[in-house]
Amino acid sequence: RAMRHTAEKEGLSLPPVRLAVQNQIPMAGGLGSSAAATVAGVALAFGVTSRAVPREAALRYAAEIEGHADNVGAALFGGLVVTLPRSDGTVIAVRKPWPKMIRVTAVTPVLTLETKKSRAVLPESVQLKDAVHNLQRSALFVAAIEERRYDLIWDAMQDRLHQPHRQRLIPGLSEVLSMPRIPGLLGLALSGAGPSIVALTMDRHAEIGRAIAGHFERHGLASTVWHLEAAQEGLAVTEKRSRNK
């Protein structure tokens, strides 16, 4: 779909293709698998027609397909990306480097949770104080990373807009979000629509992963734990041509 969308926007004629995909991002886990696939499709539309990938256009097309630019911006550029869609359809993206010492421990319980269902529990409107709460913490998060005030990340990752409403959909989530601060753990949150948890860690990664998974296990849910590094670079396109014999 992303290839066709891009081709239509750019007036390209796509040749027949056969795709072999290697994907390490869990699907339907709230970890951005659809955004990564969308960015790959947009890039392929340019690649198979022997054109360089224009990043601004790629971001716009990917955001049109996804419905928002957050995850596609990160997949396209890597690092820490702040995005803003304009009324004319263009998308602003500002990329900042991610501190290499901060890693991501992702814990995904074995639980089927459709994004549509997860979004359906969100209220149509929010209280002003809750909106202000999250806006302040979004700004604080970026400032904390920029100024290396990693002690502030815990406060910056507190949420009132979506996590409280989704706790009833994910057994064990309330216990995870109530975990106390422990050495090595900078902050944690529900990743996207869930059910995955992402914890920002500087040390004791395995111990933190086990502690999070333990809350799900007490509700009868097995989990998969990944210890990840943030990608400093995003999309990379490599072309290999076979020699005719």
Image (cartoon, grey):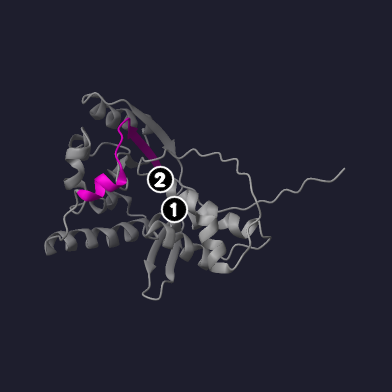
Q: Relative to 233, is 113 above or below?
A: above
Callout 2 touching callout 1 (CB < 8 Å): yes
Residue shown at 69% from the left, 60% from the top: 50
Point out which mark residue 6 bears. none
Residue 112, given in percent of the width and then of the height, sits at 31, 35
Mark 2: few, some, or many residues within 10 Å (few <14, many ≥20)? many
Q: Which residue is mark 1?
A: 98
Mark 1: few, some, or many residues within 10 Å (few <14, many ≥20)? some
> In this rendering, does residue 89 appear at all?
yes
Q: Relative to 130, is 189 above or below?
A: above
Residue kind at label 2, given as amino acid type: Ile
Left or right: 81 as drawn, with respect to 46: left
Residue shown at 44% from the left, 56% from the top: 72
Residue kind at label 1, given as amino acid type: Trp
Distance between mark 2 and mark 1 Cα atoms: 8 Å
- Answer with the quarter of the image where residue 70 lies: bottom left
Q: Residue furthest right?
A: 245
Q: Relative to 169, is 216 above or below?
A: above
Is 117 magenta? The answer is yes
Q: Secondary structure at mark 1?
A: loop
- Answer with the quarter of the image where residue 67 lies: bottom left
Residue 241, given in percent of the width and then of the height, sits at 76, 49
Between residue 102 and residue 37, name the one nearer to us: 37
Residue 133, given in percent of the width and then of the height, sits at 18, 59
Residue 21, given in percent of the width and then of the height, sits at 56, 41
Left or right: 53 as drawn, with respect to 129: right
Between residue 11 and residue 196, name the one nearer to us: 11
Magenta range is 102-120
Point out which mark residue 102 bears. 2
Q: Relative to 76, is 107 above or below?
A: above
> In this rendering, does residue 158 appear at all?
no
